[in-house]
Structure formats: C-alpha cells, structure tokens
Amino acid sequence: MLFAPGPNLPRRTFTVAAQHIHRLKQRISDLTTTPPSVQAATPAPSSFVAIAALTWVSFVRSKHPDAISSNDDVYLFFFCDCRGRRGIDPPVSNSYFGTCITGCLAKATAQDLLAEEGFAAAAAAVQGEVRRAADDPLALWEWMDLLSWLPLDRFVNVSGSTRFPAYEAADFGWGVPSRTELVTMNNSGQLVLVADKGGSGGVQASVCIESDHMDAFTSHFLNSLVD
C-alpha cells in the first residue's frame, strides 16, 4: 500500500536551560490553588510535566481562535514506561530489555488552557494522567484505538523523554554529535523531548506545527520561559 506524502510542516527546536525549567516548576507551584495539606502530598512537577504543559498551552493559544475555539476539548498524548509498575501480571522488572509502554491521554477544555492560570491547569492535567498511569498502567494499553476518534487538529503528541541522553547515546566513537533530531517528525502538534547535550539539566524540545501558527507558538513558548 502506498501512502500519499503528508504536508511539509516546519519545525523548531528550543533548548530549555535548567534555570528556565526550575522557573516553570515554580510558576506551577505558585499558580496551584489546592490547600497546603494537599500540596504537601502532591509530588513536585517534573521537568516533563513543566515542558509538556507549556507546549500544550502554547499550541492551543497559537491556534485560537482560528482553528481551536474556547469550547473545544484539547488533548495531549504521551507514553509511560510500564517496567516496574504495579498492576501488571506477570510483573515486568526494571531490567527488562525491550519496549514495554502504555498510552497516557491528558484532556482539558481550550478555555481552561487559555485562562490566566492555564499553565497550571495544563500541568495539573498532565500530572494527573501520570498518577493515573502509575496506578493503572493498562488502562490505555490499546492506545492505537485513540487515533480513530481523537481530533488531530486539537491534539499534541509527545515523544521522547527529558531524561533520554540522545547525544551521549549517539556517540559511536567519533564524539558527541553537534545536533540530534528526529528525522521522521512531520505531524502538526508533535513534540520530541531529549536531554540537552552536556548533562546540564536542560532539555531540547523540538516542535512541529503548521506554518500559520508557528510564529505565535514560538512567541508564547519563549516569552513564558522568561516571564
């Protein structure tokens, strides 16, 4: 079967320094309105949660109101490693060498993410799905079924990990590469994360989106890092 080539969409790669990630995490904490007793029991937002939430909000804001209305539901999908998780019988050990992943789907209304506290709302949705996957890793095991009903124009798809040492892993004896990118990245709303080169704690985030929305996305994403 032959597939027609998809649109040639632009991509941009952002390097988010460790200090900017720390600032994003602090903003999530500052915007969270849950009681202190609940906050104490809630894990601090991870780098993944912070960057995924920022990308999701930037995506929605860049496409509103042209392609996304305030009443629309919006989604963010990512994978979770099932090794060492509870709820799998037989259990899969942390030393298992192979792919053992399940799907995670965070959902919100565009209005929630467009609000002044939209960044915190996005982070809460992502963090809640991380907790759900930890408690019930098999709930979205058949994640391919999502593609049959998810509105792809309101959908952010996250690949990779803020902890994946892509540069070090690609050192085959000639030294660390100067640049690492996912060559198959050409879907609107796609986000690819890898650890930044040098082990500084930063993250490289590559984003693909329609050209009509890329400038607005870039503006919101970068401005949010320095606010």
Image (cartoon, grey):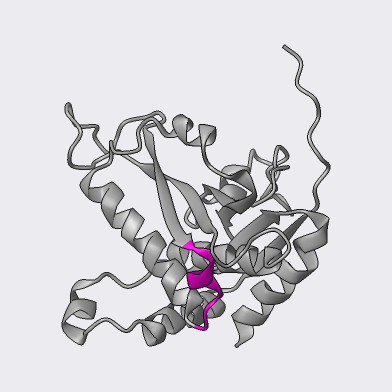
Q: Position of residue 20 (x, y in %)?
A: 56, 79
Does the image show residue 197?
no
Q: Nearer the viewer, residue 78 or 59?
A: 59
Q: Is residue 176 magenta?
A: no
**Residue 18 drawn at (x, y percent):** 53, 74
Dominant secondary-structure state across the stretch colored magenta:
helix
Q: Is residue 110 above or below residue 189?
A: below
Q: Is residue 18 left or right of residue 43?
A: right
**Magenta span of residues:** 109-116
Residue appearing at x 47%, y 69% in the figure: 50
> Which quadrant, please, contains the C terminus?
bottom right
Name the residue rendered at 80%, 25% in the picture.
4
Farthest top residue in view:
1
Is 204 above or below relative to 3? below
Give whichever of 198, 58 is nearer the camera: 58
Point out residue 33 in the picture as x, y percentages from the top left corner: 32, 84
Residue at (73% x, 40% y) in the render = 183
